[in-house]
């Protein structure tokens, strides 16, 4: 186990600069394949470290809080979209930000994610969360009340089928199997880096206990500081395996970000800013946003 007196957060001095990710690579204008490919290539050329795709299988119609999108807004499946973008890029990391894990079949998802990791040459960052839209769960026939325990069970099941055990077996509360294999395994071993999204005590526990990183979406500086303080508190009660190293912090800021605010996020302990472009941009606007935003990484 990691030293209980050590910080759970990776020190900002560990790297030369703030990593930059680009969000919404499967929605809005990037639901168009030509636009998505052009933006992905531009982001990679500009030095972005990663591209991120969110998930909503369905959206409530009419829109009800806390739905983040209008019911008619396009959003592609994140795994399909990132596989497409993998074919149009060479180096940039590809992140799910996030997959709503309790809505998925864990074995089918494990196969899809392993396929993406293999086809991309080991570039997948696996972001998962429990979800928050009750109408979406209801439409999919998934109980909303047990989404947390279901997420824990599904993560364990996916780790089991990705393991080197032959045959794989797992017996949990919501999923059980034995006498199977699923090949190919992910290119990254034992599996792609796991990033836990969410602002709850359960999310902090999952991140500290079993993930490479934590992802906070739509956070201003004060909210980021609050979340990082809660994570620091969590590490005092939850052991972190030493092999995971320090926890990498990713944040999608609320509102616009300039060099000064990027510095302040970095000073709080953030390692990656996953930038969401402003609404209403066309392809030219997105390409201009990518070019201007790329300068933020070098200054932090």
Image: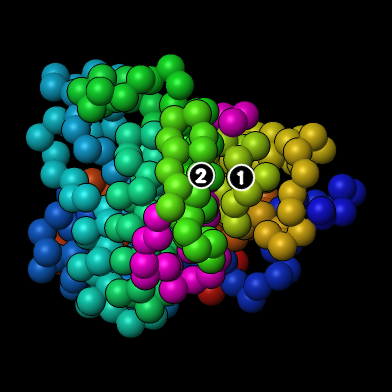
Of the pair 242 and 214, the residue shown nearer to us: 242
Rendering coords of residue 239 (x, y %): 77, 44
Which of the 4 image quarters holds residue 225?
top right
Judge whether residue 23 can be spotted in this image.
no
* 245 magenta-colored: no
Q: Nearer the viewer, residue 175 or 141?
A: 175
Task: Residue at 26%, 38% (x, y): give it.
Answer: 56
Total marks placed = 2
The chief SS type of the magenta part is: loop
Q: Secondary structure at mark 2?
A: strand
Q: Which residue is mark 1?
A: 207
Q: How far apart are the two marked residues, 1 and 2, measured between alpha carbons?
A: 22 Å
Q: Which residue is mark 2?
A: 170
Secondary structure state at the residue bearing disc 1: helix
Residue at position x 79%, y 34% from top? 237
Magenta-tinted stretch: 180-202
Whether 231 is drawn above or below 246: the answer is: above
Residue at screen point 33% across, 34% down: 103
Relative horizontal placement of residue 159, taking residue 119 as reference (left or right): right
Q: Give the residue at x 65% y 37%.
A: 205
């Amino acid at each position: 186990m990691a030293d209980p007196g050590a910080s759970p957060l990776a020190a900002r001095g560990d790297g030369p600069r703030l990593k930059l990710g680009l969000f919404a690579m499967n929605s809005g204008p990037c639901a168009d394949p030509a636009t998505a490919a052009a933006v992905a290539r531009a982001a990679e050329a500009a030095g972005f470290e990663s591209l991120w795709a969110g998930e909503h299988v369905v959206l409530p119609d009419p829109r009800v809080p806390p739905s983040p999108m209008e019911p008619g807004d396009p959003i592609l499946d994140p795994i399909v979209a990132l596989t497409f973008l993998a074919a149009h890029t060479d180096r940039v990391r590809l992140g799910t930000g996030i997959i709503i894990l309790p809505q998925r079949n864990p074995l089918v998802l494990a196969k899809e994610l392993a396929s993406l990791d293999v086809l991309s040459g080991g570039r997948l960052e696996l972001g998962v969360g429990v979800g928050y839209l009750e109408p979406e769960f209801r439409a999919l026939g998934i109980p909303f009340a047990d989404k947390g325990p279901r997420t824990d069970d599904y993560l364990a099941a996916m780790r089991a089928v990705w393991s080197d055990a032959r045959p794989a077996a797992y017996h949990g509360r919501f999923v059980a199997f034995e006498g199977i294999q699923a090949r190919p395994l992910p290119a990254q071993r034992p599996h792609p880096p796991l990033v836990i999204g969410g602002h709850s005590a359960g999310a902090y526990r999952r991140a500290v206990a079993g993930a490479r990183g934590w992802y906070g979406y739509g956070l201003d500086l004060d909210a980021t500081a609050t979340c990082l303080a809660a994570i620091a508190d969590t590490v005092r009660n939850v052991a972190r395996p030493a092999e995971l190293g320090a926890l990498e912090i990713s944040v999608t800021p609320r509102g616009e970000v300039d060099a000064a605010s990027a510095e302040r996020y970095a000073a709080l302990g953030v390692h990656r800013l996953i930038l969401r472009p402003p609404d209403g941009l066309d392809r030219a606007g997105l390409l201009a946003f990518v070019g201007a935003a790329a300068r933020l990484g070098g200054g932090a």
